[in-house]
Amino acid sequence: MLVRFPEKCVAWISRGDRNPPPDDSPRRMMWYQLAPPLYETLDLFGTSYPIVLVKIEEIPKWTPSEGLSEGCSLFVPFQDPENVGAVIRSAVAFGAAAIIMLAEAANPYHPKSVRASGGAVFRANLLEGPSIQDLSQDLPVVALSKEGKGISDFKFPAKFGLLPGIEGPGLPDRFRKAGVSIPVSREVESLNAVVATAVALFVWAQTQD
């Protein structure tokens, strides 16, 4: 964060006087030295390393009436923050035009999301969208469904929204048969939703010049 996004770094938080900020830290960044019990309440991952407090921007709202950007926009309905972070990482890696956080999704700035994203969340074009139930079939939605057509033979539209299902409940019925599927061995019922999304993003990315 200090190297790539110094303008977002607000404070350095450590246990007592241990681990001061690096000498080349932004001058305006504060150093909060906390008593061990207070520090431990913030150290969610138990690393004992300093914590960087960062400034985040409000996520712009998106409505279906606005349509979609050229290329692939990823709809994210995942409720597990680690899944949210991991799928954002894949979307940024494969060049998704936008990442639309649906109402069901965990916060992309949850500490577990940020960690799983490897910092990619701070590079992502995030938008705040409606519930998965409010996505219209009039949109060019490409859903990931084992009932859909094989992805290898699928021709992606010039602009579309890639829609994986929610962990557990999956997709709304209206999207199940209109989607694409990723063939897997009969030994496995289905892929993890994040893995399936990453595979689909990779396949789409290979079709781009």
Image (cartoon, grey):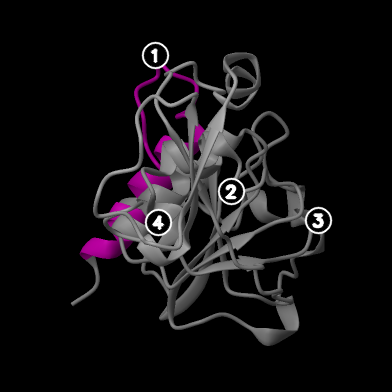
Q: Secondary structure at mark 4?
A: helix
- Give the residue number, with chain letter if any, for mark 3: 133
Q: In screen coordinates, is 70 left or right of 36?
A: left
**x then y, percent, for residue 132:** 74, 55
- Mark 2, other Cα within 10 Å: few <14 / some 14–19 / many ≥20: some
Q: Secondary structure at mark 1?
A: loop
- Give the residue number, with chain letter if any, for mark 2: 109
Nearer the observer: mark 1 or 4; the answer is: 4
* Mark earlier in primary sequence (3, 1): 3
* Mark earlier in primary sequence (1, 2): 2
Residue 179, placed above or below residue 129: above
Nearer the observer: mark 3 or 1; the answer is: 3
- The alpha-carbon separation of the residues under discs 1 and 4 comes to 28 Å
Task: Identify which residue is drawn at 58% across, 48% down.
Answer: 109
Front residue of 28 and 73: 28
Name the amino acid type tagged 1.
Glu
Q: Secondary structure at mark 3?
A: helix
Q: In screen coordinates, is 122 left or right of 64?
A: left
Front residue of 144 and 121: 121
- Circles 4 and 2: CB atoms closer than 8 Å: no
Task: Identify which residue is drawn at 45% across, 29% down.
Answer: 191
**x then y, percent, for residue 108:** 58, 49
Task: Identify which residue is drawn at 18% across, 77% down.
Answer: 209
- Mark 1, other Cα within 10 Å: few <14 / some 14–19 / many ≥20: few
- The alpha-carbon separation of the residues under discs 4 and 2 comes to 16 Å
- Give the residue number, with chain letter if any, for mark 1: 187
* Mark earlier in primary sequence (3, 2): 2
Front residue of 80 and 203: 80
Name the amino acid type tagged 3.
Gln
Asked if residue 68 lies in the magenta stretch, the reply is: no
